[in-house]
Amino acid sequence: MSDTIEPQKLAFSIREACTAISLGKTTLYTHIKSGRLKAIRVGGRTLIPAESLHALLSGEAN
């Protein structure tokens, strides 16, 4: 049995972000479009930085 510590995620895919904060994809994209949630493109993927999710949930987002 291994006692390795898994590092915290720095960013989430759209699907992972929806699961992590219990919101639907349409709602997530609405928050991105309004500027309340930051999204970045890396190659062909859209990623949501973990700190942006935390800010949205804590009410710190715009």
Image (cartoon, rainbow, N blue to C red):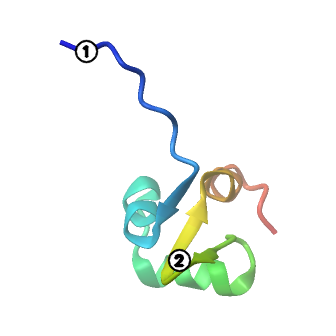
58 left or right, relative to 60: left
Report the residue marked by disc 2: 46
Say which of 6 and 24 sits in front. 6
Q: Nearer the viewer, residue 28 or 16?
A: 16
What is the crowding at mark 2: few (fewer than 14 residues within 10 Å), some, or many (at least 20)?
some
Residue at figure coordinates x 60%, y 52% from the top left? 50
Q: How many marks?
A: 2
Residue sitting at 49 percent across and 60 percent down? 12
Please tell me whether residue 14 is drawn above or below residue 57 in the rendered image. Answer: below
Q: Is residue 11 left or right of residue 60?
A: left
Farthest left residue?
1
Measured as percent of width and height from the top left, residue 21 is found at 47, 56
Residue 59 in the figure: left or right of residue 40: right
- The residue to which callout 1 is attached is 2
Residue drawn 54% across the image and 80% down it: 43
Q: Counting residues from the N terminus, which is met first, the one under dot 1 or under dot 2?
A: 1
- Picture quarter containing residue 49? bottom right
User: Tag 1, which secondary structure?
Assistant: loop
Circle 1 residues within 10 Å: few <14, some 14–19, many ≥20: few
Give the number of the mark in front: 1 or 2. Answer: 1
Amino acid type at image mark 1: Ser
Report whether 17 appears left or right of 40. left
Measured from the top left, where is residue 29 in percent x and y? 54, 83
Q: Residue at x 68, y 59 (%)?
A: 52
Q: Amino acid at mark 2?
A: Thr
Query: In the rendered view, would you say 37 is above or below 55?
Result: below
Which dot marks residue 33? none
| The quadrant where residue 38 appears | bottom right
